[in-house]
Structures are given as C-alpha cells and as structure tokens.
Amino acid sequence: MIIEPRMRGFICLTAHPEGCAQNVKNQIEYVKSKGAINGPKKVLVIGASTGFGLASRITSAYGSNAATIGVFFEKAPSEGKTASPGWYNTAAFEKEAHAAGLYAKSINGDAFSKEIKQKTIDLIKADLGQIDLVIYSLASPVRKHPETEVLHRSTLKPIGSTYTNKTVDFHTGNITNISIEPATDDDIANTIAVMGGEDWTMWIEALKAENLLAEGATTVAYSYIGPALTEPVYRKGTIGRAKDDLEATAFKIADQLKDINGKAFVSVNKALVTQASSAIPVIPLYISLLYKIMKEEGIHEGTIEQIQRLYAERLYTGAEVLVDEKGRIRIDDLEMREDVQAKVAKLWEEATTETLPAIGDLPGYRSDFLSLFGFEVDQVDYQKETNEMVKIEGLVD
C-alpha cells in the first residue's frame, strides 16, 4: 500500500515502516561513528520502542555490543492498517541487531502490569541470567495500578492558579494565547501515580528479588526540567510533581542496590520533539525557538546524540558519575546554557504568527514530528508501494 501521514491534532494516525527503518539505521550509524563505549553488556529497556528508550537500546547495542531486551506497548499492523511507529522501529532494530550477531528480544504489553514484569523476568532467567543496566523510559498517559486495579490518568495542569501564555499550532504556524485551569488534588495524585517513581521501584524490586541484577548494576530513568517560561505548566505543575517523585525515587532505589554496589540515577534530558511533548501547550513554540538558536550555535542534538553522550561522557567514563546538587545527571546542559536561554527569552517576547517564520524553526519542528512516524525521512521513496505487515523477529509470545 501507499502510506501517507494522516493527522488528527497532534497525533499521526499512520506510520511508514521503511521511514521508521531508515530512522533506526541512521541512529545506528551515528552510534557506530562515535566509537566503542566501555558500557553495559546485558540491558533491559522499559519503554524501548521510541524516543529516549529506543536511543538507549541502540546505544547499548551498537556502542557496547550489549544484549538487549526491550519492553513496550505498541499496536501491531493489520491488513490495510499500519502499526504504531514503535512497532516498526523495533522490527527494524531487531533485524539490524540480529544481522550484526547481537542478542535482541522484545516483549509487547502493559509494562505496569504484573504479567509483563513476570514475562520479562522469565526471559532474563532463560537467556541472559542477569542484567547490568535497566533503563526506565515509560511515557504513558494512563496506568492501571497492578495492586488496586485503579486506572490513573495523568494531566498537564498548573498548580494553584490558571496559567496563560503563548502556544503555536505547529501545523499552521498560528500563535495564540492559551489558558489552562489549575489542577485539583486528584489530578496531582493521579499524575504522580502514572509518571512518578512507583512503577520504576516495582520493576527494580521484582528484578532484585529474583537475583537478576548483576553486581554493580545501574538503573537510569529520564526526566526534564526546562526553562522558567514553561515552569508554571510543566516543572511546577502536575507533571513536575511526578518528576519530583521520580527523582526522589532514585535515592530510594540506590539504597536498595547498595548490597550489590548498584547505582540509580535520573538523567535530565533536553527538550525534544516527541509525541508526548507535542501535546503540551507552550512546548512546541519553545522548542521551535530553541532549535533555531541551538542550530545556529552548532550545539543542537537529537535523541540519539543525547543518549550516546549520556553513555560516553557521563555513565561509562570510568570515573565517578557527575551529578548536580540534587543528584541528577544533567545532559540538558547545552539547552540550559545561560546565553541560549537568554536568547530564547528574547525571541519569546517577539514571537507572533507573523514573526515566527523568521525567528523560529517551525519547519524543523514539523519535520522532526513527522519523522517520528517515518515520514519526511531522506532516502525513502514515499511513492512506492510498501508492505505494512512487518513482523518483529524477536518478539516473545
């Protein structure tokens, strides 16, 4: 079939298997070009099919020749209907990994559930024995609690007062003001339940109870802070409370891993175009201005550049891991440079529908967004028939 992007708001309803495959190949080639990393050898990535999780899996495999197990929740293809992009990403990764002689298997299902945790434990026991790196990179808007069976839904809201600021429709380039009503206590609690550290803890406790964490094992979860102008709706809003909980969880997990000399970190990463960030008011406009500046400064990074640098320059240098005053790895250091943020703040004041084409990088934002779904990727002929029925070679039933 001929596959074209079909949009509904900030969601693309289709994905292109060959475009997704080319994206994966490009990331693999980048990691290979940077040379070997004296890193992990047996890696579990929870949330492994897109974004930072996918980049972590690729960096582990092609930077350190690691065996990888990926856990994710993706939609399989059916005749005439495409899979979700994460399905195609994983299929492409496993095809490349197996051709390179690398172990790679995957589990598709609800990572919050006891069933998927147990299936993962069984696979590690059968194939790898122990794991030396656990990446926690889940980005789900909902979570069914495995104990209470309550369905929690996260919200993106300020706390205490209504938040009003600029936002952009990245399809049209129109800048308007948006107001978001403040969160209730239930909103805050539900968002923490979905995006906080409880499930990360459950994963580590389940793995450790079965002696599946190797001596000196490391676990890393991903977070974001961002600039002052997004603080009310992000870092000081409901999601920020969840991130606070996630970051506090790293210290608790580190204590639990002391007997195996293990470590737990939260890595604060750069603002990037993702399905999740595209849904957050204000963020697309911020990113379009940020990208313009960082590209001009020659310091722009995509997902794979961020994670390769995290591994090579933070986690696996052979020295103590550098953290900030709150114990976090800061791989958002280039984004948060004072000169960069000062320029963003200035452009923010100037940003209108009329000025944005000159002062921002909305075409770059749109291109990055579409590439998440395998569209607008170089070296792909979108006029050709393509087979949507792609299988994941190492998918565990």
Image (cartoon, rainbow, N blue to C red):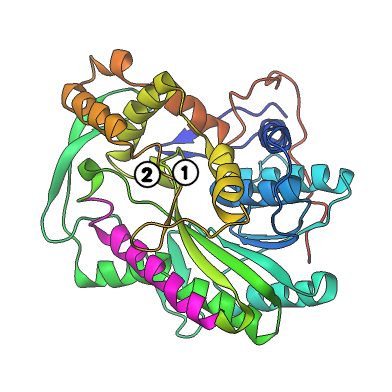
- Kind of residue at badge 2: Ala
Q: Which of 150 and 356 is in front in this view?
A: 356
Dots 1, 2 in contact, CB < 8 A: yes
Identity, as a three-letter code, of the amino acid under mark 1: Gln
- Left or right: 80, with 193 as reference point: right
Residue 286 in picture, x, y percent from top left: 30, 34
- From which residue to which does the magenta span run? 233-257
Q: Specify whether residue 365 is painted magenta.
A: no
Residue bearing the label numbered 2: 279
Question: Which percent across, then down, holds residue 179?
Answer: 16, 44
Identify the image quadrant of the C terminus.
bottom right
How far across and how far down the image is residue 51, in percent? 55, 46
The tally of labels here is 2
Q: In which quarter of the image is residue 66?
A: bottom right
Residue ID at (62%, 51%): 56
Mark number, residue 207: none
Residue 261 seen in the figure: yes
Mark 1, residue position: 275
- Vertically, is 396 above or below 373? below
Q: Nearer the viewer, residue 355 or 30?
A: 30
Res 16 quadrant in image: top right
